[in-house]
Amino acid sequence: MARKKQKKQLSDSFAFVVDGDTEKWYLSLMRQHESLPMTIKPELAENTLKRQYEQVIDLAQSNSKVFWIVDYDVIRRNTNQQDKSKDTDEQIFRKYYDKLENKDNVIVIVNNPCLEFWYLLHFKYTNKFFSTCKDVEKELHKIPTLADYEKTEEYYKQKNNIYKRLKEKLETAFDNSNRLNGFIDDPNQLGMNRAICEMCLLFDDSDIGKHIGLATSARQQIEMNDMNYLYWSFINQNEINGINLYSKTLTTKIICKKYY
């Protein structure tokens, strides 16, 4: 009988592979502000998909969880400029994305167009597609809290830093992010020209969420909602239509299907 392989014990740490400074600054502030008991290592990769993917694979060997945060506007821009007779950045990224789905400790997070869209969702829900990050920044400037927004390290790390400014609205952003379809929810479109923000996948992680004030993960909340619907269907059978009740439960699962 062949000897079973023992799983390698991973250190209790989180690693991040990102493609821009904004993600690195935001994550560093989150680590600092929350005094997280695990190690978060924002790794600023070279700005190529191949190098980022290689770094994700490498970090997954020694970290309990690896998050790859992708600004999709860069992929869209490169794809539009590339020779279509060869694999475009969008096709290359999709291949990497599919390979990483089999890695239990790797989570790929896609934001289209960019991380700033996550900031916007702290203040309102929108599924409007912004083709460039500059377009999102214009929307941020209409919000008093971020009217002075600048994509600079000095702005991010000022005394009243951007993470502190946004923290009280984190659950709103989480809910709004979760309402949007994820990267692979529409196989006909993939993600080129629609709004996507999957930052909720980061804050849904139980080990991170419990330290930043999110009492329950999204998956737990979905299960609680479904149980509540069933409970009320039993005690209010004369008041709640069973078909409508089922429809509401099904809708909840569709909205949050990225978690199943």
Image (cartoon, grey):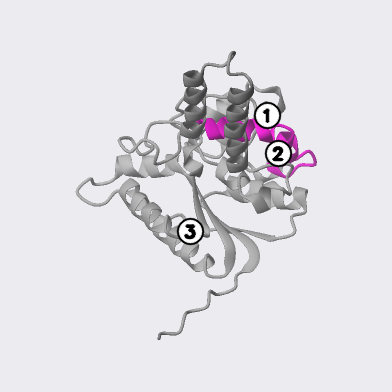
**Front residue of 48 and 104:** 104
The location of residue 214, given as percent across then percent down, is 70, 41
Q: Secondary structure at mark 3?
A: loop
- Residue 159, located in which quarter of the rendered image? top right
Which residue matches tag 1?
146
Circles 1 and 3, Cβ within 8 Å, touching? The answer is: no
Magenta stretch: includes residue 178 = yes
| Mark 2 neighbour density, 10 Å: few (under 14) some (14–19) many (20 or more) | many
**Front residue of 6 and 55:** 6
The location of residue 81, given as percent across then percent down, is 30, 42
Of callouts 1 and 3, the N-terminal one: 3
| Left or right: 122 in relation to 76 | right
Which residue matches tag 3?
46
Report how far apart the C-alphas of labels 1 and 3 lie in the structure: 29 Å
Circles 2 and 1, Cβ within 8 Å, touching? The answer is: yes
Which residue matches tag 2?
162
Of callouts 2 and 3, the N-terminal one: 3
Type of amino acid under label 1: Leu
The residue most toward the right is: 159
The location of residue 46, given as percent across then percent down, is 48, 58
Type of amino acid under label 2: Ile
For the N terminus, give its image quadrant.
bottom left
The residue most toward the top is: 239
